[in-house]
Image: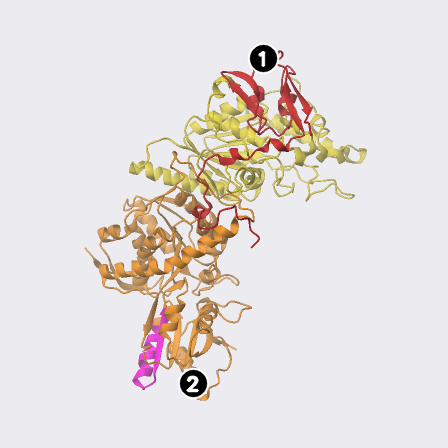
Amino acid sequence: MSLKELSKKMERLSPGHRLCAGCVAPTIIRMMTHAIEEPIVVGCATGCVEVSTTIYPYTAWRVPWIHNAFENVAATISGVESCYKKFKKDGRIKEEIRFVALGGDGGTYDIGIQSLSGALERGHRFLYICYDNEAYMNTGIQRSSATPMGASTTTTPAGEVIPGKKEYRKDLTAIVAAHNIPYVAQASPSHWSDLMRKTKRAVDADGPSFINVLSPCPRGWRYPTEEGIEMARLAVETCYWPLYEVFDGEYKVNFKPREKKPILEWLKRQGRFRHLMTPANEHIITGLQEKIDKDWEKLLAMSK
Amino acid sequence: MRKIVALVGADAVANAMRQVNPDVVAAYPITPQTEIVQRFSEFVADGLVDTEFITAESEHSAMSACIGASAAGGRVMTATSANGLALMWEVVYIAASTRLPIVMGVVNRALSGPINIHCDHSDSMGARDAGWIQLYSEDAQEAYDNTIQAVRIAEHEMVQLPVMVCQDGFITGHDLERLELLDDEEVRAFVGSRKIEHSLLDLDHPITVGPLDLPDYYFEHKRQQAEAIERSRAVIDEVAEEFEELTGRSRPKVFPYKLDDAEIATIVLSSTSGTCRVVVDQLRERGVKAGTLKIRCFHPFPWQEIMEALRGVKAVAVLDRSASLGALGGPVYLEVRSALYAAEMRPAVVDYIYGLGGREVRLADIESVYSDLSRVVETGETGAMVRYLGVRE
Amino acid sequence: MTESKTKPGWKKIPIGGLILEAGNAERYETGDWRAFKPVKDQEKCTNCLLCWILCPDEAVIVKDGKMVGFNLTYCKGCGICGHECPVDAIKMVEEET
């Protein structure tokens, strides 16, 4: 899959969508839709992508696409996939179609976790992609369970008494892996080749698959628009967002940085962590570093 | 071959679903609907249907999956009750606004709280603004007949709306009754196959379903829905006529009983209509000009048929098996009274909230209603607008 | 009646909120969002096509494997292309007003 080859393929998402300048989500969508050869049907949870790509009467989607509500894209795609299975049995449809559910961290980690779990457990053949921008960005940067500890959001603002979010982020990738589905992975748009390889592997799996993709947000994270890919890269190089996959239950870390960068390198670039750069809040950064180190060691131990 | 069988109401609906043989059923169990889902699961396990059956992990997901499957072009059915319906409230609206012909059996049960698993109409009445067509069934035969007709009504090109087929929880749902099942082939021929204009699985014509409407388009989409449910009035009657030709069973929107010369009348939905008819017969033997009107199709509200049927009646009692707390009266009362506002000769109209949470309604209770109505006619005084039948003071 | 007469009424639009014209967002020109636009140094460019795959708005034009320019109809001026270009072949310059 060279970029040259891919540049000849039709884009499944059209330009003219209204995602923010510098939003990495459409880049992720482009990468992932390029990686899938078969025709696709996409389901989307309410959120940045859904709202900005389908403002009636415009749609940026060149493939069949459905939005239902915030918490139910996995359930909705379950229905589409089941109908497809039925039509194939009947002979009404002959093509191989792949089903992709797309949700932000809001619609996946929190309100959508039930319908995701149900769809995974029932074994529908679909790929769930979470574009994780670490807060409910679409509605104004409110915290989600994916928001990192210490981050300032509009519902966990850095105030006089409380310095941002108090809880560590939820490890949703591990929760999904515990469903024992054929394929689970974490990916980043900064490592596009890895992301695309994982996408292909995911849709080839005969059952549910899940990829959690870090999706930096210039508005919510507060960095200059041109640095989105760099933010993702730093997250990987600090081992905050490890690139790994779980293929039939076997863990494999895909990228081990030559020099593991301290998390401060990532934190200091983003306005949402600015309040942590004081002696009073130093312990938060220390706590974050310790957690990252611990989790990284654990991951390495699980991986061959 | 048609068969006379003894089935509980839920089982009757499950059999209707079996004969329709939908593409997808996504459902979650809840008492007293459970029998529908369990029975249907048996049909699936025994290979009697070709349906893809999704055992959803909640009612919200069940209806969400139904929406996905229906938007993909499948014929989709499901069932629920009470809090299950309440849980899917948001997606019930979306099913209607996306114009998907989903058919859902609702086995009426009281909404919590307190939690109560017995019959009243608060669940389906609570969803009456969602844009679904609502049919109420008096007994297992009607539930069966309504389910089959619902498929045709929902999928009609002038309609394209989901339909709720209601029956009383436990009273009908768990009650063993005699009914006639049509031959499998007859049902297949009656429902035909779904004509799909647009579907998610049509790769040559990719569609976007469920976009964001800003203030410049939402109103127009809702106006379309209003038009569709109005157009469904004629379609509901057309389908009923065709069904009558097939079965000999008449299924109009309302069932007048001894109303031609009636002076006093009750208006009622579902199983209690049987009780009313028995009381009417007893009263008639004593020379009282009593009648009753059963409403089968609640939404779209058959106001013209109701006005017509009540012509000449002097006092009407609406029996509401749910309350609309804070409103003038129960949901049926509100619509009936509103319809009668335009009548040349307005009868006195009173509301009886009854049977909440499965509270039994006896012949004596209905008799007392008619006595009240007789007193209204005699004295010319309507008295209290809303009364409570069968509650302990 | 204050509603614009140029937008279609309820009788003219598809039912159910469906959009039947795939990808018609193309008609919405996001290019007027930007304050900065990308400018390419042709000599430095190695046609690695990273700018192409990273652009959120498909504003990098590629022909026969060669990066030939920017689609200014859609470019929002985010600057990701310039920032990520491994040979510094792209600069963001202020848009003329």
Q: Residue at x 45, y 56 (%)?
A: B226
> Do discs 2 and 1 share a chain?
no
Chain for disc number 1: C
Query: Where does the image place residue C85, in percent across and percent down from the top left?
Result: 62, 18
| Stretch of the chain drawn in magenta | B274-294
Chain in yellow, by letter, is A
Tell me the chain of label 2.
B
Looking at the image, residue C93 lies above or below residue B140 = above
The hue used for chain C is red
Residue with the mark numbered 2: B377
Using the image as rendered, state which of residue A46 and residue B161 is in the foreground.
B161
Q: What residue type is disc 2 on?
A: Val
Label 1 packing within 10 angstroms: few (<14), some (14-19), many (20+): few
Q: Secondary structure at mark 2?
A: helix
For chain B, give the colour.
Answer: orange
Q: Are marks 2 and 1 in contact (CB under 8 Å)?
A: no
Asked if the stretch drawn in magenta spans residue A246, the answer is: no
Q: Residue furthest bottom?
A: B379
Percent position (x, y) of residue B391? 49, 75
The one of B130 and B222 positioned closer to us in this rendering: B222
